[in-house]
Amino acid sequence: MRKRDQTKNRRETMKAIAMILQLGLSVLTCMGMSLAIGYYIDRLFRTTIWVPVMMVIGILAAIRSMLVLTGHYKPNSSEKGTTDGDSKEKSD
């Protein structure tokens, strides 16, 4: 195997490892923060409902984060409320 092929393989391997680590950290962050907020709200108001509610919200946020990082979902970066029809009307 050529040296540049080894370098290319090493670079691709490092990119894959970085993506796996980024996915794991984003899932842990989303779920950990939402669980911490739910626990704090439960302790503050002496209830037991907020931890499961925030856990569901954390799971949904983690799924969205995974989709964004893998490229399956791309949030709309244009202005809110503008559609193709609106942009055509503005240019006329």
Image: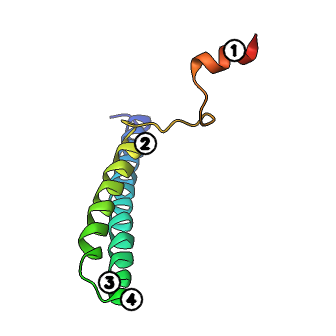
Helix, strand, or loop for circle 4?
helix
Name the amino acid type tagged 4: Leu
Name the amino acid type tagged 1: Glu
The residue most toward the top is 92
Tag in front: 4 or 2: 4
Q: Residue at x 28, y 59 (%)?
A: 59
Residue that numbered label 2 is attached to:
7
Given residues 46 and 40, the one toward you in this image is 46
Q: Say whether disc 1 or disc 2 marks the residue closer to the N-terminus.
A: 2
Verify CB contact (< 8 Å) between mark 4 and mark 1.
Answer: no
Alpha carbon separation for disc pair 1 and 2: 51 Å
Verify CB contact (< 8 Å) between mark 4 and mark 2.
Answer: no
Given residues 73 and 18, the one toward you in this image is 73
The quadrant the N terminus occupies is top left
Tell me if mark 1 has few (under 14), some (14-19) or many (20+) residues whose alpha carbon lies within 10 angstroms of its own: few
Name the amino acid type tagged 3: Asp
Residue that numbered label 1 is attached to:
89
Residue 26, quarter of picture: bottom left
Tag in front: 1 or 2: 1
Alpha carbon separation for disc pair 3 and 4: 5 Å
Residue that numbered label 3 is attached to:
42
Q: Position of residue 7 (x, y in %)?
A: 43, 42
Alpha carbon separation for disc pair 3 and 2: 52 Å
Alpha carbon separation for disc pair 4 and 1: 51 Å
Helix, strand, or loop for circle 3?
helix
Verify CB contact (< 8 Å) between mark 3 and mark 4.
Answer: yes
Given residues 78 and 73, the one toward you in this image is 78
Q: Say the numbered circle drawn on residue 44.
A: 4
